[in-house]
Image (cartoon, rainbow, N blue to C red):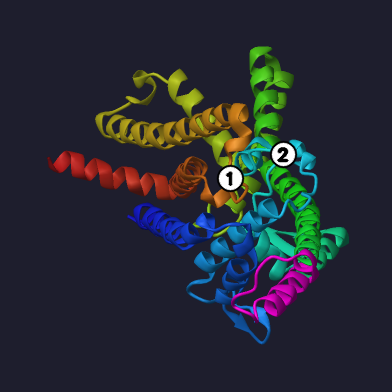
Amino acid sequence: MVRVSVCHSVRNSIKAACTRLLPFRNGGVEDVVPQLALAAKQVHCSNGRLDLTSPSWQLDCITLLSCIDWAGRALKSPIGSRKYREEFTINYRALFPDMCSRHYRVDIFEAALQWNCTRWVNGERFDLAVETAQSAEGLQSAWAALNSSLAELGADSHAKIKGGVTTKLREVLSAFDVAWAHFEHKYIIELIDIEVAARGLVLAAVKEEQQLKELERSQATGTEGEAQLRSQRSQFLARLSRLNSAANLSWKGHHDRGAEVLEMALEALKDLNSTTLQDCSKNALSSHNAQVERVVMHVLANGVVEAFEKVRGYIHEVSSSIDSVHPHLCNNDGLVSQMSTWTDSWELASRFMEPAPLLKAVCEVIGAIHTSR
């Protein structure tokens, strides 16, 4: 329902903006000044600044930026180079599809006007470069100059394009575009760097999982081989713990015993598979209790190992599509689901696989229920 409402909202905004822009597009070059001035005037201001909290801000800004783009093309105002877009990742190239158009976006404009040099992603702080802050200030100044010129030219609602007016407007439009391109370049490149760092948590887990797989394929045996496997599993789970803290918001972040519980589960399954029923059949009562304990231990241990293998499968699968991972890791449903399942499995097992008295009590309850039936 949320996605549907968002889609309807975006669709309505676009339709409304197109309705506003229709008469502008049908106008001639001589209508550039009054129509662009009108678009600027329609944007709400507070204390001389654009009011980004206004309910109509999104729609007003779409209209304004489209008019600036239209005016620049109508007046043949020089466009700043967008060749830097070739450096963008595939996700950002989808937002900026070519190197020849201005393609002004509301979110870029908003970022410059409400500049904040700090970004928080997955609980980590990222401080943007001074150069990016300076480019944001440059775009703010360019917008102020353009807005001031439009306010002067728009004072006469019947203003038409003339030689001096054309030259001045073309200059401020060009300066605005150059400042925009400079900020867009610096800002997007920084966002890409932040996203790479954010996805680094996943990449680190991918690397450890691959090393674990290679070690398993080598079929290391003996005491030394088992020690290597335990060490590599522990390193992989240490990466998972950090990933879990960032992605799984429902996890309280308490002491992670995943590696310890996994080794207990693997050892328990090994023992259970090597123990026969005859080993626990000294008498009817002890045989019954032993079988109940075996079943409980097997369910708990098997749940831990299955969850571990599933999260490994997810990490392996995502390694081939790392760019599709949302940098805010909590927004990846698949990752959150796997982390939750893994955490639930080892937390449950840690409560009942030890201490022994608690496991014994659980088995006695289960045995009593079974007997009563």
Q: Nearer the viewer, residue 13 or 363?
A: 13
Q: Which badge, 1 or 2, is on the more N-terminal residue?
A: 2
Magenta stretch, main secondary structure class: helix
Tag 1 secondary structure: loop
Numbered range of the magenta stretch: 141-165
Q: Which residue is mark 1?
A: 326
Q: Which residue is mark 2?
A: 99
Dot 1: within a 10 Å radius of its alpha carbon, few (fewer than 14), some, or many (20 or more) residues? some
Residue at 68% of width from left, 78% of height from top? 151
- Residue 238: which quarter of the image? top right
Q: Is residue 55 above or below residue 109?
A: below
Disc ID at residue 302: none
Q: Amino acid at mark 1?
A: His
Q: Does 215 appear in magenta?
A: no
Q: In 3D space, how far apart are the residues under numbered discs 1 and 2 (Cα atoms)?
A: 25 Å
- The residue at the far bottom in this view is 47
Dot 2: within a 10 Å radius of its alpha carbon, few (fewer than 14), some, or many (20 or more) residues? some
Residue at 59% of width from left, 30% of height from top? 321
Q: Position of residue 344 (x, y in %)?
A: 45, 47
